[in-house]
Image (cartoon, coloured by chain):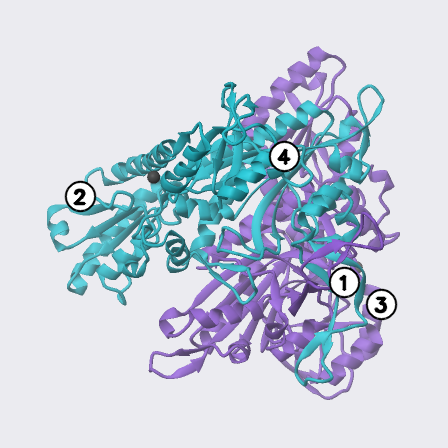
Chain colours: A cyan, B purple
Amino acid sequence: MSKNLTSRAEDYSKWYNELVVKADMAENSAVRGCMVIKPYGYAIWEKMQAELDRMFKETGHQNAYFPLFVPKSLFEAEEKNAEGFAKECAVVTHYRLQNDPDNEGKLRVDPEARLEEELVVRPTSEAIIWNTYKGWIQSYRDLPILINQWANVVRWEMRTRLFLRTAEFLWQEGHTAHATEAEALAEAEQMNNVYAEFAENFMAIPVIKGLKTESERFAGAVETYCIEALMQDGKALQAGTSHFLGQNFAKAFDVKFTNNEGKLDYVWATSWGVSTRLMGALIMTHSDDKGLVLPPNLAPTQVVIVPIYKNDEQLKQISDLANTIKNDLKALGVSCKFDGRETHRPGAKFAQHELQGVPLRIAIGPKDLENGTVELARRDTLTKEIVNLDGLPTLISKLLVTIQEELFNKALNFRNNHITKVETFDEFKDVLENKTGFISAHWDGTPETEQKIKELTKATIRCIPQDGEEEAGVCVFTGNPSKRRVLFAKAY
Amino acid sequence: MSKNLTSRAEDYSKWYNELVVKADMAENSAVRGCMVIKPYGYAIWEKMQAELDRMFKETGHQNAYFPLFVPKSLFEAEEKNAEGFAKECAVVTHYRLQNDPDNEGKLRVDPEARLEEELVVRPTSEAIIWNTYKGWIQSYRDLPILINQWANVVRWEMRTRLFLRTAEFLWQEGHTAHATEAEALAEAEQMNNVYAEFAENFMAIPVIKGLKTESERFAGAVETYCIEALMQDGKALQAGTSHFLGQNFAKAFDVKFTNNEGKLDYVWATSWGVSTRLMGALIMTHSDDKGLVLPPNLAPTQVVIVPIYKNDEQLKQISDLANTIKNDLKALGVSCKFDGRETHRPGAKFAQHELQGVPLRIAIGPKDLENGTVELARRDTLTKEIVNLDGLPTLISKLLVTIQEELFNKALNFRNNHITKVETFDEFKDVLENKTGFISAHWDGTPETEQKIKELTKATIRCIPQDGEEEAGVCVFTGNPSKRRVLFAKAY
Ligand SMILES: [Zn+2]
Ligand SMILES: [Zn+2]
């Protein structure tokens, strides 16, 4: 199967699109821009969900569920937020279909069943949630509210790509309410840190934590924290955002509380989210020309065993051994599958598991039975070796940890090698075109300069890195003074 | 708080509505018929989800995700299904809002952004899924497909009630594809059995397994299996359904496969689902006039510890002891919360935990510290006793199992006492009005009789019980011959 995969060098974009489909992760549906997430892709998403959910609960958050629809009057209440999403939202206008009198067997919208007020399919839930929080908050004793929601959202994007940009996507959105500005700011930063930890430790994707510039901020936010990752083609991908919303939504929905001094004040807010877009980041960070490469933490199957046999007797013996290995691995918390399909040859199985990124493959043949060995192959390095059955489960368990670390380090090296300091705009353009990656450059802090650079190069400011030092310099474009470098890149 | 709860005898329906809101489970939202599921309610739903998900996976199913929207042309493809849902579906007709020129600061639907084809917000996903399966199935080797989806769906119901009937609700929907009729039938029955097991063993809700009559079947199904529960007011509630869809959807979407004899045939299908409606069943099966009663399996907090103290010194000592108890319980897999809020008096805490159905409450006062005892109160029986600290965690762990069993048995007794055999229509009406519950009666098997009984009494045939025996008799309404009894009831 992998032979049919376009190589990254040939056409990175095509490689990605093919890989998502051939590895059975997702496919396009009959609905423009909406994807079907297939079981193999969904199993990876479930692992992400479980870990994130654990981390959210550990930091004191609870899950809840708010309506899919936002009445237009609520949608438009926070002006900037509305402006940011109005151009790409699905709108429900009717609540009934009827038989089409002109077209037997067909249905049409019932013109009598027009909604008095149109409903927007949520592109994000601040509006409906803050309208709800209004009823929950009277006093500082009702705060903080620390809620997360797992949900689907719809943004009517014109150009869509599986996982990276789809009209409907799955995500989680945290929405918190606080008595003080400082507490809300700390929450927004905390959740960005949670995302960074998750991306690095669980997905093996190195990220840069930073703040968005005004023009790249979430519509309605006062400050947007983000984590930015670098894909193998040198383009950046925003992997998560956490917004400090100030009192914007509290003001739009009139959510006031009595503080501990008895005074009325507007409530402070944050919101934060990651989505199935992370699946795209995962694929583009680790995979290669043979297919998916999965960090062991995210692999639905961590170890696959393929039998190589000439007769039923051999298959039986190999199956028995495989079962023992599988159970020993299970006891160590390692998931293992025996691929005993008689409809496929070992070569086809190897190719499929390679394409689907199973971290470790064990092959067992008649010789192995004699020698008490197996062949162990690593998906990430494509290396294989003959190992003894003795101590195999422990070896594998440790090896999975090693693979997880090495994938992260490999991605980290690549990322670090693709952060380039430039001092002139010529250098800027040269690096962007020829080396690609993040460009660390001085910027004069104006949206105008940011916009001009974007128009000329398609590069945007990905973030103002949080760990960046103050360093006096001059803007790479205007020559005006600058206090610190920011990171530019072309981005997904 | 519980003082404000209307009693069941006074007004059962009002009792339910108040309880859902006061126990912090859910509330109505700004969107007609759509609810907000609050953290406490959602935590219960999460426990249901986790257990069902485990059971689905154990029976070989995988999760996936299909689009929220169904293009109208797909929606109408399976005629009966379309007919069944056309009258209550939300329809997306536009994909953009714009500034309203007549109304500054307001938005309106952009008339230029009309969709070429309307999109129905899924009321159920057979259409979009079978249109997808068409691309996945060529040969018997591609079968079976055993997929489940956790999703939100929308049915534009006119009369809504929290959890029981809402315009948007959360559910899971299984959609499977099979090579043979027998296999599909077995799957449909298996999943109904899974639901029954879940309802009885996990939710402590006794159910009757059976088949729906033709007029009560899912739109598009050949056969609908169901589980029916009985609420405390003597009304039935359909708690889950599993449909054998025959080849209806395969034919509507032209999904054929080559069978193992090399012949082309249409694929056989099932679908099955349970929803947040189960929350309503849970509440109405076990709760009482003081509030929610939760089976330990579903309680977000199984044990709550309330300190009773006069000074900080006592509070400190009680907290320490509570912490020890909490940790010991945690080791036994029991969830326990220490309610140390200084803003609330013990009485208020007692009332809240009673209202929210925490199965066990421990109160610890200064005397208990002296005596090495605690006061242990059961929510279900409202009994309390002084018990020794010695062996407390084990006692509690066992007691939770007992409570789970006793809740089931109590509900089972009630249910069994409310299945009444009747022979005449006068008896039928009398039992329905005065005793309520299920009525076991002979029926002549015609939709006409079923319809007439419904019109006259509002009772419907809940199911043809699977464990019912053949028994010759005459229809309670027409006097025509009947081969077996069916169960009638008024229902939610
Ligand atoms: Zn490079
Ligand atoms: Zn009774």
Q: Which residue is mark 3?
A: B433
Camera-nearest label, 1 or 4: 4
Report helix, strand or loop for mark 3.
Answer: helix
Residue drawn 42% across and 72% down? B137
Q: Whole-Å distance between the Cαs marked 4 and 2?
A: 53 Å
- Front position in the image: A117 or B8: A117
Q: Whole-Å distance between the Cαs marked 1 and 4?
A: 58 Å
- Front position in the image: A457 or B184: A457
Q: Amino acid at mark 2?
A: Glu
Mark 2 vs mark 1: tell me if same chain: no
Camera-nearest label, 4 or 2: 4
- Front position in the image: B25 or B422: B25
User: On the picture, is A90 further left or further right than B159?
Assistant: left
Mark 3 vs mark 4: tell me if same chain: no
Residue drawn 57% across and 28% down? A190
Image position of B484 with respect to A332: above or below: below
Q: Amino acid at mark 3?
A: Glu
Q: Whole-Å distance between the Cαs marked 2 and 3?
A: 77 Å
In which chain is the residue bearing label 3? B
Q: Which residue is mark 1?
A: B235
Tell me which image quadrant ligand 1 sits in: top left
Q: Which residue is mark 4?
A: A214
Q: Residue furthest bottom?
A: B480
Task: Count residues near mark 4 (Cα–Cα under 10 Å), then give few for <14, some for 14-19, many for 20+.
Answer: some
Report helix, strand or loop for mark 1.
Answer: loop
In which chain is the residue bearing label 4? A
Q: Amino acid at mark 1?
A: Lys
Q: Closer to the N terminus: mark 3 or mark 1?
A: 1
Q: Which residue is mark 2?
A: A385
